[in-house]
């Protein structure tokens, strides 16, 4: 309680709620006060809204989210928030991923005594597969599997923990932890290259980044950050802008990484990734503000963070008008669709480099870089497609179009035996990014603003869980099917994607029928 005296016949009583409350309110009791004094009190105690503060209103209550709780030392324009962080981090992550796959392939080739340049398999596709090449493919695929198992196994625990904690403690601490994990991983990889350590240390590096959430928590918290500040009408577009940041950074990294590796080897590109991760930490500190009111008493290692995820799944969201069993089933179906799409994309993307390195394609670092760059153009194409078509057809229909594009692309990859056909597959699947932002936007609208971190961490958690299965399947299916169809893994992915296509279609028809009945 606080008292302010201005005159003998004037008394003011101010009651201020707990500052850790997500919706701080100021209750004023003004007795015998003239208008000028009242205006002075109100202007001094209640800050005027600024153009930098966006408000997002929950559909179930009228709580207002503050766009910037704690201003950073420096401020960019209000439209730019976590996008540069995603750009910088993904440049380093994409560069590291491609370089690591190629480095492991070279090390394994040297260990088994294989030298592709001594064979004619790349110039004559009718020759049988070299047994040594098959062994290198198998071992390299298994090392890719071990690295992904390392990051995702620890991510099963860290992603929901950090995501739920961010709803209470704030988004910035989690983003800083994530960047720290990537920095430690980059340092270890430099030591591996410099000291010629066994490739097993790459697995340890993946485990380290997984403890800090890796890319899953980076994207989950970035989505939550945007959802904190953006209204529902613009949410889908802003989420796909985040996805487009992935594409732009991936395209740049693919071109730079391939050419740089060809010119100077592995060590300098890895030093570059370390510098980029350090720059990300600096950007976070200087330019990114906190989007929620943090509770300093929030505990990171608490079972309540996991319970929040379970409550969300068992309740099925708290904002949408439909409730009960139907609402819960809808959320589960959306989650299943997102998981299947992301895991098939992850499973096949882990094979692209191996598929392109070996016969009959036999690409070098430069072609691998250009191929990845063309694939990453899909992010920009998806952004443009959503922006153009959003006013004409429903978001669900756009997502189905994206799934059809992905399925056709995977079918082309499965039979690609020339460079032209491989690039055709990349072009055909240019809309493969669209379904994920649409799904995440739909799920974000089903939960309250205070559950955004939980929602997106649940997506990351379930993605990690099924990615373990997916990578096990794809990285074992690829070497197992080399003898009769090298691209069978891509054909299998196309078949799996028919499931979310059906889910989208059924839910869209149910929504149209319900709207017709309501009308």
Image (tube, helix red, strand yellow):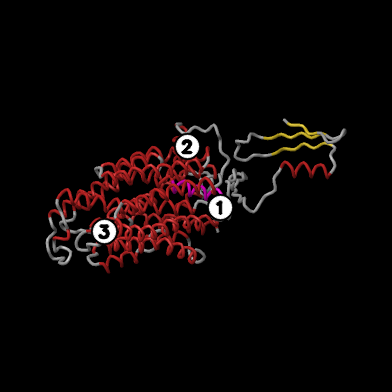
- Quadrant of res 9: top right
Q: What is the crowding at mark 1: few (fewer than 14 residues within 10 Å), some, or many (at least 20)? A: some
Residue 270 position, x and y percent, is: 34, 50
| Residue located at (45% from left, 52% from top) | 86
**Helix, strand or loop for disc 3:** helix
Image position, residue 289 (x, y; %): 56, 46
* Secondary element type, mark 2: helix
Residue 64 got which mark?
none
| Relative to 134, 369 lies left or right | right
Provide residue 364's location: percent of width, then percent of height: 26, 61
Q: Secondary structure at mark 1?
A: loop
Q: Which residue is at 55% across, 59% downward?
A: 519
Residue 31 seen in render: yes
Above or below, comparing residue 513 to residue 215 in the picture: below
Foreground: disc 1 or disc 3? 1
Report if the CB atoms under discs 1 and 3 are less than 8 Å apart.
no
The spot of residue 461 in percent (x, y) is 39, 43
**Numbered tag placed on residue 491 in the rendering:** 3
> Label 1, label 2: how many angstroms apart (C-alpha)?
23 Å
CA gap, disc 1 and disc 3:
38 Å
Query: Which numbered circle lies on residue 308?
Result: 2
């Amino acid at each position: 309680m606080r008292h302010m005296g201005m005159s003998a016949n004037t008394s003011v009583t101010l009651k201020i709620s707990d500052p850790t409350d997500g919706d701080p309110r100021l209750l004023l009791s003004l007795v015998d006060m003239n208008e000028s004094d009242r205006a002075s009190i109100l202007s001094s105690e209640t800050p005027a809204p600024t153009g930098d503060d966006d408000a997002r209103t929950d559909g179930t209550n009228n709580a207002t989210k503050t766009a910037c709780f704690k201003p950073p030392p420096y401020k960019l324009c209000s439209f730019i928030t976590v996008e540069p962080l995603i750009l910088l981090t993904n440049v380093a992550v994409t560069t590291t991923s491609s370089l690591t796959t190629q480095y492991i392939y070279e090390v394994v080739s040297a260990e088994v005594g294989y030298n592709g340049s001594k064979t004619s398999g790349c110039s004559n596709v009718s020759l049988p597969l070299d047994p040594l090449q098959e062994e290198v493919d198998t071992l390299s695929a298994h090392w890719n599997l071990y690295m992904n198992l390392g990051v995702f196994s620890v991510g099963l625990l860290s992603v929901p923990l950090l995501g739920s904690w961010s709803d209470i403690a704030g988004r910035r601490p989690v983003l800083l932890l994530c960047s720290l994990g990537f920095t430690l991983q980059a340092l270890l990889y430099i030591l591996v290259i410099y000291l010629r350590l066994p490739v097993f240390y790459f697995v340890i590096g993946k485990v380290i980044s997984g403890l800090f959430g890796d890319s899953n928590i980076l994207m989950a918290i970035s989505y939550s950050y945007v959802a904190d500040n953006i209204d529902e009408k613009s949410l889908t577009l802003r989420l796909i802008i985040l996805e487009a940041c992935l594409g732009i950074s991936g395209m740049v990294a693919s071109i730079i990484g391939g050419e740089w590796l060809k010119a100077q080897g592995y060590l300098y590109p890895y030093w570059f990734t370390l510098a980029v991760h350090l720059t990300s930490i600096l950007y976070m500190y200087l330019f990114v503000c906190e989007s929620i009111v943090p509770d300093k008493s929030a505990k990171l290692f608490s079972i309540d963070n996991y319970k929040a995820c379970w409550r969300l799944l068992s309740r099925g969201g708290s904002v949408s008008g439909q409730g009960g069993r139907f609402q819960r089933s809808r959320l589960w179906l959306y989650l299943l669709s997102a998981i299947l799409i992301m895991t098939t994309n992850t499973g096949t993307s882990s094979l692209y480099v191996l598929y392109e390195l070996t016969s009959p394609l036999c690409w070098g670092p430069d072609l691998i870089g250009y191929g990845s760059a063309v694939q990453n153009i899909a992010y920009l194409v998806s952004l443009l497609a959503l922006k153009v078509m959003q006013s004409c057809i429903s978001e669900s229909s756009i997502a189905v179009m994206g799934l059809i594009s992905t399925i056709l692309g995977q079918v082309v990859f499965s039979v690609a035996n020339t460079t032209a056909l491989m690039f055709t597959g990349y072009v055909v699947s240019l809309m493969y990014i669209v379904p994920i932002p649409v799904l995440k936007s739909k799920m974000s609208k089903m939960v309250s603003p205070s559950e955004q971190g939980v929602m997106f961490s649940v997506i990351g958690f379930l993605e990690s869980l099924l990615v373990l299965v997916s990578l096990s399947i794809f990285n074992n299916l690829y070497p197992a099917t080399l003898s009769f169809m090298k691209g069978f893994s891509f054909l299998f992915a196309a078949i799996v994607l028919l499931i979310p296509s059906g889910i989208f279609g059924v839910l869209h028809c149910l929504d149209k029928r319900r709207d017709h009945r309501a009308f």
